[in-house]
Image (spheres, grey):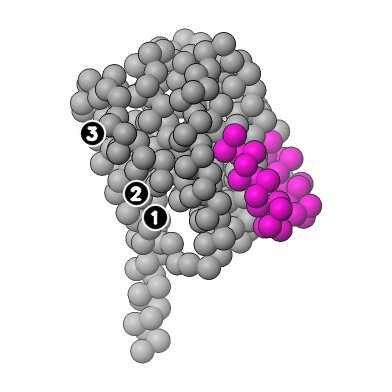
Amino acid sequence: MPWYLVIIPGILAGLVQGLTGFGPAIVLMVFLPSILPMAKAAGVAGMIPVISVVMMAYHYRHYIKLKRIVWPFILYAVVASSSIHLGGMMNVQISRVLLGCLLIALSLYFLFTHTSAQKKFPLWVAVIFVLISGFFSGLFGIGGPLMALYFLSLSDSKEEYMATVQSFFVFDMLFTSSFRIFNGIITLNELPIILIGIVGAGVGTFVAGKLLDHMNLELVSKCIYIFIGLSGIYYFVSSLMSILLKLERFTIAF
């Protein structure tokens, strides 16, 4: 396998992570399923950004609000650990279509509702966000978008948002990666891919850090909403095409 098939997506993933605080697995899962089974691809996508996330959490460590992380992480971890094994056992294309629709709707809502970023979500909305995020994190390693929205709604500054969301993802990646290793989903065979990806992600995060110094919370928020929308479009279109292709094959077979 050519190294550039991993390091270039790694750079893009690190750049997205550094600018928005989430999303490296979204970028990586565009590429990794073409070279790895879905369950392994999700595991590798969750491990490649770990150094970048730790670096960012350390950089913004003085702004971390640990109390905001505890209950979401516990609920998130329970759901994620339950859904990790489903990646290789179920057809999840319909779920990805629904997730895509949700992300597109949220992106449009927040982009065109100027006061939404300053409003804290009701508890029931926060719980739903955490449940959905944990479920899709276990399946694909892509639990970031809704958690980013949740922590953004609680933050008064770019630094506070980045510190809290990165700290959450440190715990998330360590937990889910350990769970996958313990259950044999990730083995030493995937280590070269992970290490190459880590190098790329580190480069992307470094570049993003230089750009982030010139951005305020409002601009970061817009980047988040736009990327969430683009992610939703990708999930919706790619999954819908996969469903239609399977239906076409089924029709031809009969």
Numbered label attached to residue 96? 1
Distance (Cα) linking label 3 and label 2: 14 Å
Residue range in magenta is 171-198
Give percent across and percent down for residue 47.
Answer: 65, 41
Within 10 angstroms of label 3, few (less than 14), some, or many (20 or more) residues? few
In this view, the residue in front, 247 or 129, is: 129
Residue at the image position 48 percent from the left and 67 percent from the top:
90
Proximity of marks 1 and 3: CB atoms separated by less than 8 Å: no
**Is residue 8 in sight in this rendering?**
no
Question: Compared with residue 82, is residue 164 higher up or lower down, i.e. above or below?
Answer: above
Q: Name the residue under label 2.
A: 100
Which residue is at a point 46% across and 16% down the rendered structure image? 160
Q: Which residue is drawn at 51% across and 31% down?
A: 70
Numbered circles on residues, count: 3
Q: Which mark is residue 39?
A: none
Q: Give the residue type at disc 3.
A: Tyr
Mark 2 falls on what kind of element?
A: helix
Q: What residue is pinned by disc 3?
A: 109
Q: Quadrant of the C terminus?
A: bottom left
Q: Nearer the viewer, residue 3 or 182?
A: 182
Q: Does the magenta stretch include residue 124?
A: no
Q: Earlier in the sequence, mark 3 or mark 2?
A: 2
Neighbours of disc 2 within 10 Å: few (<14), some (14-19), many (20+): many
Residue 9 spot, x, y in % from top left: 59, 41
Q: Which of marks 1 and 3 is nearer the N terminus?
A: 1
Pointer 1 and pointer 2: residues touching (CB < 8 Å)? yes
Secondary structure of the residue carrying numbered label 3: helix
Measured in 3D between alpha carbons, the distance from the residue under mark 1 to the one under mark 2, in whole angstroms, is: 6 Å
Question: Which residue is at the far bottom?
Answer: 254
Q: How crowded is mark 1: few (under 14 residues within 10 Å), some or many (20 or more)?
A: many
